Image: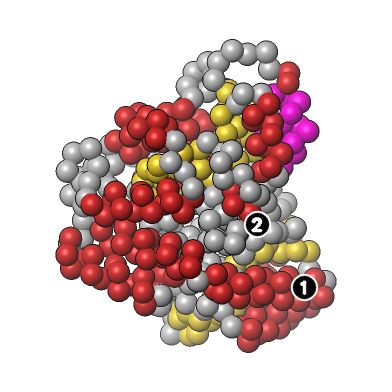
């Protein structure tokens, strides 16, 4: 009998031929500035744990206590039996942090995006989406079956053109990352807010890589741009600077009540376990009340970026802890990452489909737990890799 999965061999071959087959590296340590891989130590420059909170004693202690009290799993979706006092407490804490009236938790940022977008718009509606938005936004748009209009990256004139040429009476939603995950740059949120208000459009932003990093309180881009009261749908994730797992949306009480009743990835999904909830509550307190960690991070970002530029590398115009070094084609990017590793630095090479073809890059990310010495050592490794690549 024929194998009904026969076609997979062919697909895998195509992926391998394009050098896009993905393998992962196993870490034998936590998300620390120095990690262990196959028994060897490397400087980690590739984690979204921007403030180093995944291993912070206050955070891990809160998680341990909750684990002891509540056990490992939540036992159900929120609307069945999986809703605890900690879920409510974290939602209230997020609303306070983001200065929104209310907030709703999802089990990941991915689920928050697909569930929210597909609840807000449907067939006959329009979504305006930045061309470099995260895959979870793209998937949310697809799932919604609304018409999606892609505007050029961060291009408010293009967005305005699309908005003004639509003579349309259905619902309209603008959706954008604030900090773009593979580019590290910042969307022009103030201008997008103005457009959304002018054209009577819903506006949803994704604060995944901005939370904890931007703003005096670390609340993200809405705080940084001073528009906390003008963005009606603020999505974020608990998995990056907050150092745990989960996603959320902040907004008006009516929006949150609506999502609890309409977002399918909320309704039909087991809720977060207590250890993650307690870890996130402790982490948000640190983010808000210990700004010195963020200040240290920004000092490192400045030093690292100027060091890379001095070496002659093409650093993309980032405004966050995501610092991409553009290489171009797949093979030299893989070579660059390998040479970094040979020099004791672990930084991922990013290839399509995560970035467009020809725009492969080394995506370096910094953490507040790095020391100046880590950055200096990393810069020496980047210089060595750059010199080697020039002579290949
Ligand atoms: C911009 C952006 N949005 C959403 C997500 C999804 O978040 P999570 O990893 O919590 O599912 C990510 C992370 O990969 C992201 O980078």
What segment is highlighted magenta in the picture?
150-163
Q: Residue at x 46, y 39 (%)?
A: 251
In front of the other: 91 or 115:
91
Q: Is residue 210 visible?
A: yes
x then y, percent, for residue 379 = 70, 79
Front-most of residues 278 and 181: 278
Report if residue 300 lies within the magenta region: no
Q: Secondary structure at mark 1?
A: helix
What residue is at 42 percent from the left and 32 percent from the top? 255
- The disc placed on residue 348 is none
For disc 1, the neighbor class at 10 Å (few under 14, some 14 to 19, many from 20) is few
Quadrant of the rendered image containing residue 157 = top right
Position in image of residue 347 (x %, y %): 59, 70
Q: Which residue is mark 2?
A: 184
| Image coords of residue 183 (percent x, y) | 66, 55
What whole-number distance in Å separates the C-alpha atoms at marks 2 and 1? 16 Å
As drawn, 239 above or below 55: above
Q: Residue at x 57, y 34 (%)?
A: 203
Q: Mark 2–mark 1 contact, CB under 8 Å?
A: no
In this rendering, is residue 40 above or below 30?
below
Q: Is residue 160 magenta?
A: yes
């Amino acid at each position: 009998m024929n194998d009904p999965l026969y076609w997979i061999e062919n697909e895998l071959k195509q992926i391998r031929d394009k050098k896009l087959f993905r393998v992962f590296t196993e870490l034998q340590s936590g998300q620390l500035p120095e990690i262990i891989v196959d028994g060897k130590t490397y400087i980690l420059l590739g984690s979204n744990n921007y403030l180093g909170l995944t291993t912070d004693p206050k955070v891990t202690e809160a998680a341990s206590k909750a684990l002891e009290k509540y056990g490992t799993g939540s036992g159900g979706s929120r609307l069945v039996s999986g809703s605890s006092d900690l879920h409510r407490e974290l939602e209230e804490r997020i609303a306070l942090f983001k200065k929104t009236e209310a907030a709703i938790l999802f089990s990941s940022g991915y689920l928050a995006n697909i569930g929210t977008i597909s609840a807000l718009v449907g067939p006959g509606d329009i979504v305006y989406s930045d061309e470099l938005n995260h895959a979870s936004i793209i998937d949310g748009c697809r799932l919604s079956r609304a018409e999606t209009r892609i505007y050029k990256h961060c291009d408010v004139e293009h967005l305005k053109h699309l908005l003004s040429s639509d003579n349309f009476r259905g619902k309209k939603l603008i959706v954008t990352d604030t900090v773009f995950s593979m580019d590290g740059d910042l969307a022009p949120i103030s201008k997008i807010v103005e457009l959304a208000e002018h054209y009577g459009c819903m506006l949803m932003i994704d604060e995944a890589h901005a939370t904890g990093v931007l703003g005096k309180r670390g609340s993200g881009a809405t705080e940084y741009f001073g528009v906390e009261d003008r963005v009606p749908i603020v999505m974020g994730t608990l998995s990056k600077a907050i150092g745990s797992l989960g996603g959320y949306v902040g907004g008006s009480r009516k929006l949150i009540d609506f999502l609890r009743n309409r977002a399918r990835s909320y309704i039909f999904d087991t809720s977060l376990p207590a250890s993650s909830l307690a870890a996130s509550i402790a982490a948000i307190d640190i983010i808000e009340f210990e700004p010195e960690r963020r200040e240290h991070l920004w000092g490192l970002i400045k030093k690292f970026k100027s060091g890379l530029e001095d070496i002659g590398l093409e650093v993309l115009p980032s405004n966050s802890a995501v610092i991409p070094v553009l290489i171009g084609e797949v093979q030299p990017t893989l070579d660059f990452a390998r040479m970094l590793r040979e020099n004791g630095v672990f930084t991922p090479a990013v290839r399509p489909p995560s970035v467009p073809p020809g725009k492969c890059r080394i995506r370096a990310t910094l953490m507040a737990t790095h020391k100046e010495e880590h950055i200096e050592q990393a810069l020496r490794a980047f210089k060595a890799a750059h010199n080697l690549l020039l002579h290949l």
